[in-house]
Image (spheres, rainbow, N blue to C red):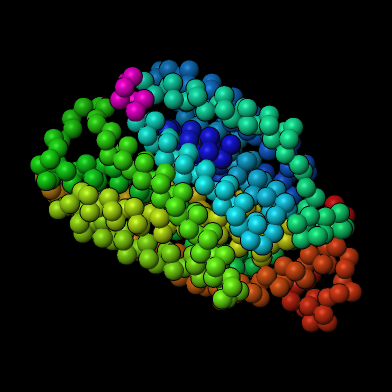
Amino acid sequence: VRFMLNFSERITMTIKGKATFVFIARFMVAAPIFGYLGDRFNRKIILSCGIFFWSAVTLSSSFITKEYYWLFVLSRGLVGIGESSYSSISPTIIGDLFTNNSRTMMLSVFYLAIPLGSGLGYILGSSAKEAAGDWHWALRVSPVLGMTAGTLILFFVPEPKRGHADQLGGRIKHRTSWLCDMKALAKNRSYVFSSLASAAVSFATGAFGMWIPLYLFRAQVVQKTAEACTKDICSSKDSLIFGAITCVTGLLGVVIGAATTRLCRQKTERADPLVCAVSMLGSAIFVCLIFVVAKKSIIGAYVCIFIGETLLFLNWAITADILMYVVIPTRRATAVAFQGFTSHLLGDAGSPYLIGLISDALQKSYTRSVLWQFLSLGYALMLCPFVIVLGGMFFLATALFFLDDRDKHFVDTLIQSDLQSVIPTIGKATSYHDHCKLVNP
């Protein structure tokens, strides 16, 4: 299902930028609501309903004609609501089924579907536009598979008790209010910094997905290996290549990230945020090199994209695992939802438009110059490596507080389980539950 959601989203991204913005905006609005529901009610039912709703709306939107474009934009917003239910809840089910290295591996399998679905969405979305001149058929494949997956989840996926993997399934007797949950998350430094770092990743990937294919095409025009496009539907070769690279680098990044973290945990308990920080800082170097070599060598630019994206995607599953370590089971859906909200709000909801505005502002003096069109977009995209470095700094800050926040998570879980007797005398003083009223689930 994770694969199909990203597949459909990226198909639409290659077609309608405004529709993608509405999708992200509705996702951000709905995610906190589903986070609240996911911490208090049957997650499997909420999950399945969200998938069925997303599939039905996606299928319906493929029949909307251009005369009703506003209805298509509205439908993409409704798809965002459906996806928010899935994205907010599914990681918490994995978190309650597995722990430690097993959880890291299973979260990696889950997040493998993001680059795979996104990359194939770019490829097939671009192919559909070019081959048929009509992208609607691309939106009619994923809903069928989505409904199938939703049915399988409803009937075959277990609904674990919250805290089951921590050997506390059925022992959690109390739950805090939503307001107290939000206060606790705001005080959780590891959660806050890792969420900001995740937003930096989202900023870069959103901008790359929208502008890198066009940037590489303009580079070829400057090199005189391609003709400038004046048609409505242009060659999608660069989108196809970029989509393929996104698939491969996403798969490699998630696998390498999980393996590296597992190895580094034998050396340090702060392995998770440190691996993320190093990969982000390394990615920034190769992203910068893209804009250095693109004018002379397209192949060199693709090599830099490959390495830069691989390092950037290393932290997807690890970031989710960090959240599981520092947030208690009855608060995880809310935490995942607001992390997604932050990532979109500060990341891909605005980065493509910000890059476009900067590029357009730089182009004003030499609008007719092919070289300046290429350079202005490159200068605008140079904002991305700076944001990536900032994300690496946020992961380093996460490493500073990670062990302390993990211990607070352990104390809070024991408090909710009525196992205060095993908490050291100083433990409760460091709990995020201080001044919170406990209520029955």
Asked if the magenta segment contains residue 205, the reply would be no
Instruction: From the image, give the main secondary structure of the stretch colored magenta.
Output: helix
State the residue in front, 274 or 84. 274
In the displayed structure, 398 sits above or below 300; it is: below
Q: Which quadrant of the structure image shows residue 100?
A: bottom right
Q: Which part of the image, by quadrant, shows the N terminus?
A: top right
State the residue in front, 156 or 237. 156
Let me know if residue 46 appears in the view. no
In this view, the residue farthest toward the bottom is 426
Q: How many marks?
A: 0
x 87%, y 58%: residue: 171
Asked if the magenta segment contains residue 131, the reply would be yes
Q: Looking at the picture, how far across and down is residue 369, in whole percent? A: 11, 45
* Left or right: 34 in relation to 295: right
Let me know if residue 245 appears in the view. yes
Q: Looking at the picture, how far across and down is residue 241, in whole percent? A: 31, 40
* Left or right: 96 in relation to 217: right
Q: Looking at the picture, how far across and down is residue 272, in whole percent? A: 56, 67
x 83%, y 67%: residue: 415
In the displayed structure, 193 sits above or below 218; it is: below
Q: Looking at the picture, how far across and down is residue 386, in whole percent? A: 35, 64
x 54%, y 68%: residue: 263
x 62%, y 41%: residue: 86
State the residue in front, 48 or 345. 48
* Left or right: 371 in relation to 80: left
Magenta-colored span: 127-133
